[in-house]
Image (cartoon, helix red, strand yellow):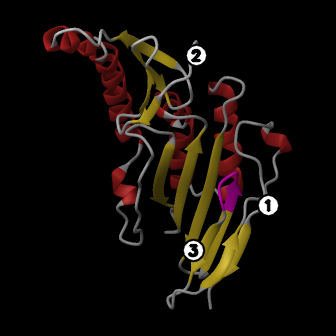
Amino acid sequence: FLSQPHCIRVSNDGFMYVCDGPFKRIQVFTLDGKYVTQVFINRGARPKSTNTAMSSLGRPFNEVEEEQRTASGLMRRLVQMDGICDPAIQYRFTPAQFLSGDVIAAARTPANCLQVLIADGTGHGLAASLGVMPVVQPFYAMTQKGFGLATIAQEINRKVREWLPVGRFVAVSLIEVDPHARMVSVWNGGNPPLVLIGEDGAELYRFASRQLPLGIVCSHDMELTVDRFTLE
């Protein structure tokens, strides 16, 4: 900035607005600091002129919103809602932005084990949402074939490294609930600890991250240990 901003606001549209009083302008940035646009305001202008200037801010936003709608529609197609609507699942999904790198997916194995994917891509907005696209399809395909969590993690890691640019990675937690063995298994790569809660509300076990997020190291160098907890 050429001068010290006198007002900074983060809006619910996913952008940050910076008011630069001395230069009579409003600058717009994404939440990760990327410049979007700016408009200069003549404080002595009549309302009509000011409204015309402010309307110029909307043009780039309309393009961004169209991109977000397109990517959001693609993500809905990738995430099979019948899996996440499994009667064994209750979830609350509140991303920081309309479009984000946060994904939750679920499916059943041929042995009727429930497998769940929780992914968090690098960054914000459209770039983050595109970053998790290579994660979802391998999860569904391999779960439906009955593969275990470690093998699924290796394949997703391969896809992430194949499709995403250097510096992009995805934190992933893979969960399997086996109703026959009464066992919960977790492979956690880079996400906060997953907490297993008993029927009485007490914490039974904490599945900490013991692996790196996917996309950082080659699949053959990955730590594939799976944490398991048997329910009484």
207 in relation to 154, above or below: below
Q: Which mark is residue 178?
A: 3
| Local SS, label 2 | loop
Left or right position of 35 against 65? right
11 in relation to 199, above or below: above
Magenta highlight range = 187-192
| Local SS, label 1 | loop
Q: Which mark is residue 225?
A: 1
Q: Quadrant of the C terminus?
A: bottom right
Quick check: is 57 in the magenta stretch? no
Q: Quadrant of residue 186?
A: bottom right
212 in relation to 11, above or below: below
Across and down, in percent, residue 212 comes to 76, 48
Across and down, in percent, residue 8 comes to 46, 32
User: In percent of the image, x 66 and y 57: which residue is there?
Assistant: 149
- Characterize the local packing of mark 1: few (<14), some (14-19) or many (20 or more) Cα atoms within 10 angstroms: few
User: In percent of the image, x 57 and y 45: which residue is there?
Assistant: 120
Which residue lies under the disc numbered 2? 1
| Label 1 – label 3 distance at C-alpha | 17 Å
For badge 3, the amino acid type reads Asp
Residue 213 or 232: which is nearer the viewer?
213
For badge 2, the amino acid type reads Phe
| Label 2 – label 1 distance at C-alpha | 48 Å
Across and down, in percent, residue 198 comes to 55, 85
Q: Quadrant of residue 176?
A: bottom right
- Characterize the local packing of mark 3: few (<14), some (14-19) or many (20 or more) Cα atoms within 10 angstroms: some
Across and down, in percent, residue 26 comes to 40, 18
